[in-house]
Image (spheres, grey):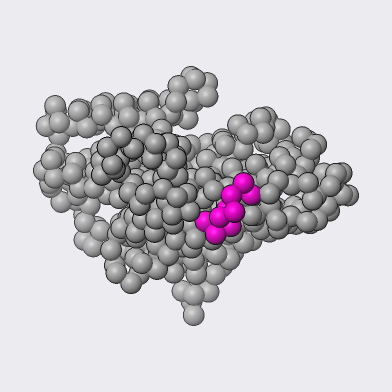
Amino acid sequence: METIIVIVFVVGYLAITMEHNLKIDKLIPALAMMAILWAIIALAHMPVFEVNADLKELEPSHLDEMLLHHLGKTAEILVFLLGAMTIVEIIDYFDGFATIKGFIRTKSKRRLLWLFSILAFILSAIIDNLTATIVLITILQKVINDRNTRLWFAGMIIIAANAGGAWSPIGDVTTTMLWIGNKVSALQLIEHVLLPSIICMVVPVLVASRYTAFKGELEGDMDTLEEPKSRFGSTMLYLGLGAIVFVPIFKTITHLPPYVGMMLSLAVVATFAEIYSNSKFTISDAVDIPGESDSHGHHSPVHASLSKIELPSILFFLGILMAVAAMESLGLLFHFAESLDQTMPMLGTESVGEHVSDLVVLILGIGSAVIDNVPLVAASMGMFSVPIDDPVWHFIAYSAGTGGSMLIIGSAAGVVAMGMEKIDFFWYLKKIAWLAFLGFIGGAVAFILMRNLVLNA
């Protein structure tokens, strides 16, 4: 039966990676794969196990308990993402991101390259790399008229956004998974991954800044950029970003799961949004005055923001995380990790990550350019039984977060940029991929050197 389980997983995985060829949204095979895997386990009465990270062994468990356990862990991530997405949409409702356009006053292409790259790096660490890419490419389309030039800028934004998301617990879905899963703590992640991420962004930008595409100045008047549509735009931008940054602080103080802090932040942002829009203070129609619910729902920024959330992405995460959880519950990932560690050569010191090879993590990073990094990280969380804040988890956060930049389809930021600017897969492979690879390797070398210095100190 284990062979059938693996076949179903591989077929589902292939369907996810080939969504563009099959013209089927990846949430469909993800949900189907999840349901089929757990159904096979239940019908075949297969034994399920819980991984004991301390003893590094499998402990027998009951199916209902394991299903509820994994659903609870997955729900923590999904509720957290729902809160973050809603806050971002509320900011956008007030056109808050138009404030960022005010920072763009130069016509030099080289300076614009650095400005957009730095903005992408910082913004992605706060509002996640996907949203940062959408915001900056939207601004890019208003600043640069020449499409060929925009393509180059868009490619560099993808690299910078993915690098920025890797060092922040709220910057990428994969780092959020590691953080909520108690694999990394916020401060330790920032401390160990920030410098490699900076190098991952700076190296490609330094090389690209010598390209012809980034020489000279832009044509047109920079002062013609649109003004924010709402006078509360800048206020909501700073409030929303501050609320999201507050979440790791709330977790550190209270030791509660991150989604609790995110819900508090959402409540605060939603309250100000309702005040600024002259609407009532309620979020739910259930407590509205009869006869006024439709009117309130139509004008409420909270309702408008909730309606724009990408629920397909949430359902995809549910399907893929629960599918990987099925593999983990059977002990397949645990045994695969053991065999992988025995066959892969070690890089670096032997005390690193309880013998988890650096090469394994590097391959995981490169693999994330081809295969979605969410299931890769989810699988690694079930494979490696090392304690919280072990260098392995920090290296996985870096590799999975930045490795996807090497292909346009390797990250959420790349896929959305591909859609917004109609970037050709092979154009990106020829022009941008090697720059992303340079940054990825540069940051990886920096991480390994920093880690070995700390271990040998």
Q: Which residues are magenta?
A: 228-236
Relative to 330, 406 lies left or right: right
Identified at 52% across, 45% down, the residue is 93
Identified at 14% across, 28% down, the residue is 44
Relative to 255, 424 lies left or right: right
Between 290 and 372, the one nearer to me in the picture = 290
**235 inside magenta stretch:** yes
Identified at 29% across, 69% down, the residue is 254
Q: Position of residue 440 (x, y in %)?
A: 60, 52
Q: Position of residue 403 (x, y in %)?
A: 55, 47
Please tell me in which quadrant of the rendered image residue 189 appears: bottom left
Please tell me in which quadrant of the rendered image residue 133 appears: top right
Q: Position of residue 77 (x, y in %)?
A: 34, 49
Between 250 and 322, the one nearer to me in the picture = 250
Between 296 and 345, the one nearer to me in the picture = 296
Identified at 18% across, 32% down, the residue is 41
**9 inside magenta stretch:** no
